[in-house]
Image (cartoon, grey):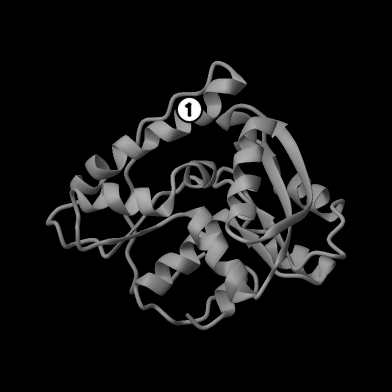
Amino acid sequence: MLKDDGVSFSAARIKHHEPDSPQRAVENLYQHAHEIAHAGELFDPPGVVNVFIYACTSGSATISQERLEEELRRSRPRACITSPMTGALRAFHQFRANRIAMLTPYIDEVGAVVTECVEESGFTVCSSASFNLRTDSAIAAVSPESIFEAACSIDTRNCDVLFIPCTLLRTSSVIEHLEARIGKPVITAHQAMLWDALRLASYSKPIAGHGRLLMLAR
């Protein structure tokens, strides 16, 4: 989404265990919190990174923004951190949205956590649908065309924005087509976390081609 050479990216992986049952899916997401400080330590010297992103939507619906900040401060106290869920919630406020339509890839147990996070933050999920997929590989295999078709089937008439969580879903190529079809802003996991990370890094240039959010001033 961002081709500007003035912003550099680096990535590290944290351990994630595929759940062996729906009940363990949310429990496994909680375990990510213990990896945040260690991941921060991998980037040297300590001040080289201004903004960290914990790039898991369901995980960031499970682990609060406050907990993410607390964990990162243990190793990188001067850096900021955001996530897809934090970025999305801030984007809803940016658009003054109250009613959210949602398309997720998740099983019910994980989808319920994301819905609860949205609603506890003061918004209403007015319409939703899910691919009901259990594994990361199955989610990553969903085609952009399938995402577009599924999103178009959701009733968004009484909603302010459409939210598509999960960084495993390949949404970047369909955002603008969806916005043109439904006439509403579309917020996706990658787009929201990039928008908020750039905002935290004081990068204010508009980015074309990936929806209304990235065209907004930050």
- Which residue is pictured at 26% across the width and 65% down the height? 50
How many numbered callouts? 1
Task: Provide the secondary structure element on which disc 1 rests.
Answer: helix
Mark 1 packing: few (<14 Cα in 10 Å), some, or many (20+)?
Answer: few
Q: Residue furthest top?
A: 20
Q: Which residue is mark 1?
A: 27
Provide residue 161's location: percent of width, then percent of height.
72, 65
- Which residue is pictured at 48% across the width and 45% down the height? 56
- Given residues 16 and 61, the one toward you in this image is 61
Q: Amino acid at mark 1?
A: Glu
Position of residue 59 in the picture relative to residue 103 (left or right): left
Provide residue 88's location: percent of width, then percent of height.
56, 61
Is any part of residue 107 visible from this angle? Answer: no
- Given residues 94 and 43, the one toward you in this image is 94
Position of residue 37 in the picture relative to residue 111 (left or right): left
Q: Residue furthest left?
A: 45
Is any part of residue 94 visible from this angle? Answer: yes
- Which residue is pictured at 83% across the width and 66% down the height? 182
